[in-house]
Image (spheres, helix red, strand yellow):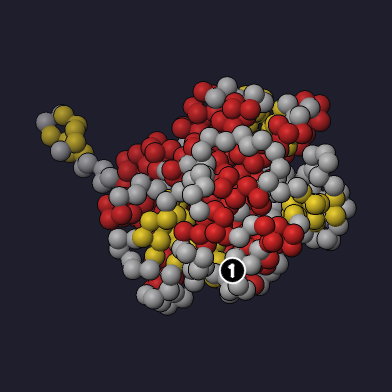
Amino acid sequence: MARITYLECTKCGTHISADQPQTVCPKDGGVLYIRYDLATLKKSFPAASLFGRTPSMWRYAEVLPEAEPVSLGEGFTPMLPSREFPNVYIKDEGLNPTGSFKARGMSVAVTMAKAYGLKKLAAPSAGNAAGALAAYAAAAGIEAHLFMPKDVPLANRIECESYGACVTLVDGLISDCARMIAEKKEKEGWFDVSTLKEPFRVEGKKTMGYEVAEQLGWRLPHGIIYPTGGGVGLIGMWKAFDEMQQLGWIGSERPQMVSVQAAGCAPIVKAWDDGKTSSEFWPDAATLAAGLRVPKAYGDYLILDILKKSGGIALAVTDEEIMDALRHWAKVEGIFAAPEGAAALAAYRKLRANEFFGPDDTVVLFNTGSGLKYLDVIERQRLRAQPRPASRHIGGIIGPY
Ligand SMILES: Cc1ncc(COP(=O)(O)O)c(C=O)c1O
Ligand SMILES: [Zn+2]
């Protein structure tokens, strides 16, 4: 495994020691990236050395922090060729432990928390990050304190409680959950593992970038469509591409990175359309894709920069388009996706229709989670969409016919 050389601020470039747990840059609040000595590593770590290794994300141990992994078998998920669209692949993250890609980030975050001797972790979550943190904290024997909106999918609350985590349901959004943790953490002695306010979740999520390259035979696709809430996966994959280039595994080519958001909460899309370098808080955020209900992403400046550098785009899809894509994927591909993942298909359809992508472009769609975690959400949607039976009044009896 790699010894961390330093943590680097993505805003001011300051170097910070990894000897104790870090959060964000003390000077400007910038997101911190973990840096390794890749020039030295390049001499001893060819891509071919991965052959025959364990099929989990820890196969990339040389570019992950040096510590005993807290692992539940996360990563190395299938890269499935679409049965509907030639040249399209579905990276099925629903097969991770706890049923979503959040497992990757939490595996590394908890690994490092354990290595640092931290005993109490806290996180605000739209649901799946909480489930993942609860599971890895349980495996590591660490306390997890989780704050989620009170209308979180049922599976997320039940899994967290089953893993023995302390769950607080909040009458508000993930931003309100984050504020509550910020207010309490000092008094309670919690270490905050909020999205991008803790540097190791990105390290876990970046392994998706390594896998995309390895599973496509070290050729990057033309495009990657990523359902974006906090944007950690998109940011992590971009970091992975830079690292792989420094290791000599790929060249300077990059995929066009696409952020898809829900029309009811699309701060990145608005900032992109307005040509801004950071986003504004999205008021009254509402979508059935719980993981996309992030009104202001902490790493918005990184996401927008990546979209620009990659020649990508941000676009929004409606909840109706998401549900239609979810059902279609299940029927045509045999993949029961999370609503967030289905948003990637809805986005691909739009980007084919407007010719952003052509039929020959290789595009990877990220299904970030399993539909099985959203049964209550999907059922509610089905009942809402059903035509209401007409009520007729015949001979004093009121009833549906
Ligand atoms: C299934 C799913 N997809 C996508 C997202 C958004 O992920 P990110 O915050 O990395 O953009 C989430 C976040 O909760 C999620 O649970
Ligand atoms: Zn800084």
Q: Secondary structure at mark 1?
A: loop
* Residue 136 placement (x, y as % from top left): 59, 32
User: Which residue occupies 63% across, 47% down?
Assistant: 61
Q: Is residue 35 visible?
A: yes
Q: Nearer the viewer, residue 265 or 394?
A: 265
For label 1, the residue is 250
- Crowding at mark 1 (Cα within 10 Å: few <14, some 14-19, many 20+): some
Residue 251 in the image: above or below residue 294: below
Total numbered badges shown on the rendered structure: 1
| Three-letter code, disc 1 | Ile
| One can see residue 152 in this view | no
Q: Is residue 302 left or right of residue 71?
A: right
Q: Is residue 141 above or below residue 182?
A: above
Residue at the extreme left: 395
Q: Residue at x 59, y 27 (%)?
A: 139
Q: Nearer the viewer, residue 255 or 154?
A: 255
Relative to 335, is 214 above or below? below
Residue 399 position, x and y percent, is 19, 33
Counting from the top left corner in percent of width and height, residue 50 is at 54, 53
Residue at image coords 49%, 71%: 222
Among the 4 quarters of the image, the one containing residue 265: bottom right
As rendered, which of 302 and 394 lies closer to the eye? 302
The front one of 268 and 258 is: 258
Is disc 1's CB within 8 Å of ligand 1? no
- Quadrant that contains the C terminus: top left
Question: Would you identify the image quadrant in which residue 114 lies?
Answer: top right
Q: Residue at x 77, y 34 (%)?
A: 116
Task: Point out residue 52 in the picture as x, y percentages from the top left corner.
Answer: 49, 49
